Each structure stands twice: as C-alpha cells, then as structure tokens.
Image (spheres, grey):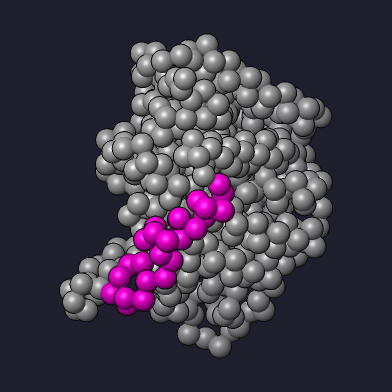
Amino acid sequence: MEVTILSMTPKIIFFAFISYTSLIFFVAWLTSRKADNQSFFIGNRKSPWLVVAYGMIGASLSGVTFISVPGWVGTTHFTYFVIVLGYVAGYAVVSTVLLPVYYKLNLTSIYTYLGGRLGRSSYKTGSAFFLISRIIGASFRMFLVVEVLQVFVFDHYGIPFWATVVLFLVLIQLYTLKGGIKTIVWTDTLQTTFMLLSVIVTVGIVISTMHTTFGDMWHRVWATDYSQIFITNVKSSKNFVKLFLSGMFITIAMTGLDQDMMQKNLSCRNIKDSQKNMTLLSLILVPVNLIFLFLGAVLYLFAAHIHVATPELTDQLFPQIALHHLGIVGGVIFFIGLISAAYSSADSALTALTTSLTIDILELDKKYKGNEKKLKKKRQRLHFLMMLIIICVILSFKLINDKAIIAQLFTFAGYTYGPLLGLFSFGLFTKYTIKDKWVPLIAVSSPFVAYFLSQVMEFLFSGYKTGFEILIINGLITFIGLLIIRRKTNTIIPRQV
C-alpha cells in the first residue's frame, strides 16, 4: 500500500536531514584541517580536476535545474535543450580564451584582470556587478529550494519560512567558514551524486508504477509535444538560434566571468587540469540536462496516468508528485536531493562573494599582506556579513514569486552580467585605453538601454519577443559605450593575454 511521505515521516524526514547534514560536516572537517586563507580562496591550487569537474555538475545544476526544468517542460517542452547545446560552445570559449588569461596572471579574483587592463574604476565596477549578480542569483536559487521545502515539509511542523531560511544559511556558513573552496570542491561531489540519484530513482519508480519499461517510456515521451526541441519562428523568444546563442553567452558570462564558478577552476593544479575539467563538464551536462527534461515529461505523463491535476506553479510539479504519489522511497530520495540542491545553491556563492568582497572591494589581502591571522579574522566576519545579506534577499523574494524561477534568474542575469561581458570583451579583444572614470556610468546605463531596446523591438517588429539574448544585447551596449569613452590618442597598450 502506497503511503504519502507527509503523513508518515516526521521522524524519517528529520533523520534524512540530520544524516545528510552530518555527512556534509564530516567532509568539511576532513578537508578543512590545516586550512589557511589560500585554502579558502583557491584551495591552495591542489584540487584534483576530475573531482572539480564532477562537483561542478551539481553547482551548475543547483536548485534551478532540479526544480524548475522538469516543470518547465509543460510550457516550453524540450526547447531548453538548445540552450544546453549552447552551453557546450560557451564552455569551449571559457576554456580556450579566459582560462589562459586567468592562469597567466595567477589570479585569485578574476576581476583583478580589469584593474590591470582598463583601470581601477573598471575593476571596482566589475566586482560590484558580480556581487549584485551573484547575491541575486544565489538568493533566487536558494529561495526556490527553501520555498519547496517550506510548502511540502516545514509548514507541516509549523516552522516559519524565515526560520527555515536562517537554518540553512547558518549551516552553510558553518561548514564553509574555515575551508572555503577547499571544502566545497569535495562537498559538491556529494551534492551532485544525490541530485542525480534523486532524478534517476524517481524515473525508475514512475516507470515501475506505470508498469512499463524504460524503452517504452522513452518512445512515449518522444511521441508527445513535450519532446519538441527546435522552434523556427523568428519572433518567438524560444527560437532555436536565439536559444543557442543565449546558452553560449550565458555560459561565458555566468561561468567564465563569474568568480563563483571560476574559483573552483582556479583551484586546479594547473591550466591543463582546469581545461580538462571544463571540457569534461561541458560534455557531461548535455546528457544530464536531457535526463532532467525527460524526467519532466515523465512526471506530466504520470500525472495524467493517475488523473492528478498538475500544479499551476510549474516549479511544484516535481515535489508534488514525489512527496504525494511515489511512496516512502520516492519521497525520501526527493527530499535528500532537494537538500543537496539547497546546499549547492549557496555554499560556493557564499565563498565567492566573501572572496570578492575581501580582495576586490576592500582589498584586505593587500592591507594585511603577511598577517594571515588578521586577514583570516576579517575574512570570517565578511563571510558572516554575506550570509546575513543573502538571508535578507531571500526573505524579500517571498513577495515576488510570480513565475518560474529559472526565467527570473536568466532574465535578471542578462541585465547584470551584460556589463561584465562588455568589459571583459573590450579588454581582451581591443588594445584601446579608456577614460576609466566613466566606466561606472556606462555599466549602470547599459541595462536600462537594453531594456528600452527590447521594448522598442517588440513594438517595431510586430511582437518580436526578446528572450535570454538580452545578455548579448546588454554586453554589446557596454562594449559600444567603452568605445565611445576610449582615449583619442594613438597610445595602444599590449593585451594581457
């Protein structure tokens, strides 16, 4: 007899939570022994590339893919897969263009490059845009997962939303406080494992419950509209060319120009290991994301099979089916996968934000150079401060949860990562110097100009919908703005590549 997880598992849910969290803290204890500031920032550049690659799967997926992508299948079908193919091209650019620059300059924070190439204002602007982008992005991801946990689990015990948020962020703060990136490289491997295991087991349980086989289910999915991948309508925001280019530039910006993602790569022993990590990651993400899309289609078919209405909020499809209709095993596996997503959504972000605030904004590594103890103390205080900021942002998101989080995340990232894309592109692919003091104005203005253009294009081109390509438009506007403020002299400086 199938029993729903909420009616029978107060102790099981608590046991699963405690067990998994204890495992995370045990790994943190093992990896953070003898950790210093360089361990926190770049893992002493001793991280095995294969471990980094595997762990980054979970970091790349996080709660967004775990929750939103399966539900998204109901409205956008498999069109997200085109974005994933764009990711592969984007990772190739990161591996061949950006990583050589970062390793040649021996960077701890990637935004240091902007200071050496364009000037101090450019450096501070890039760092500030990363802080804004990552705080919002990490908070969105964390909010998505905590919201699901709250609705389907913690509300059952009368625990308020704010307490759930504080609980998870405090736990994450504690296990990342000492070891930083050295710890996260290894905890990410656990999170990746449990997220993937959750998806695979869920598919297996659904197939078994429907008394069919994997092969038959595969054919059923591909026979439905859910399997539609390519949309050729140029006006559609889901046009396959737009999605491919968007995926490519999303990866370049949100991975290659993101301290959070690059900090793991920079912890590898050398550039060759880092490039191998990046290549393997890009190839693995293709089948992994296809599995998540397949899961979404399977869940919709299962809902129809048992005559259950799908939720209006697509982000609740996976948790509703897993927790109410897949019995003990399905519910517990989903819950552990969701906890993994919760931790992976914020742990590396918290570390990267602390790193950028410490090195880029406050420059404490220079102020306390040679004084490791003082730097560690200051860094830990900033780590706590970033935790408080993320908590406040997550709580504010409670008021604006009005559409799929993945769309909110990528739309917002198109505006905040665009200036970073423009700044790095200008630095890498031109030799011009600029009037550095004007860079903040260009960077802040670009998102507003991009938004205005998106509205104008919809009016002028009979309903043209701007999708995730807003990132490209925004980056181009920043690039043009930098050309306008370039110095008119013939002075040309060598590119730092």
Q: Position of residue 288 (x, y in %)?
A: 59, 53
> Which residue is at a point 55% across and 47% down the rendered structure image?
213
> Which residue is at a point 65% across and 39% down the rendered structure image?
193
Asked if residue 402 lies left or right of residue 8, the reply is: left
Whether residue 231 appears in this view of the structure is: yes
The answer to whether 16 is drawn above or below residue 340 in the figure is above
Q: Position of residue 481 (x, y in %)?
A: 40, 74
Residue farthest front in this picture: 211
Magenta-colored span? 213-239
Q: Which one is nearer the viewer's eye here, 228 or 489?
A: 228
Task: Name which quarter of the figure residue 394 lies in.
Answer: top left
The answer to whether 162 is drawn above or below residue 406 in the figure is above
Q: Which one is nearer the viewer's eye here, 23 or 123?
A: 23
The reply to whether the magenta stretch includes residue 481 is no
Residue farthest bottom in this picture: 490
Q: How many marks?
A: 0
Q: Position of residue 180 (x, y in %)?
A: 67, 36
Task: Name which quarter of the figure residue 236 lies in.
Answer: bottom left
Q: Which one is nearer the viewer's eye here, 122 or 263?
A: 263
Asked if residue 88 lies left or right of residue 472, the reply is: right
The reply to whether the magenta stretch includes residue 214 is yes
Q: Position of residue 298 (x, y in %)?
A: 45, 47
Asked if residue 223 lies left or right of residue 366, the reply is: left
Whether residue 440 appears in this view of the structure is: no
> Which residue is at a point 69% across and 71% down the rendered structure image?
96
> Which residue is at a point 51% across and 44% down the rendered structure image?
212
Tell me the quadrant of the picture where the C terminus can be found.
Answer: bottom right
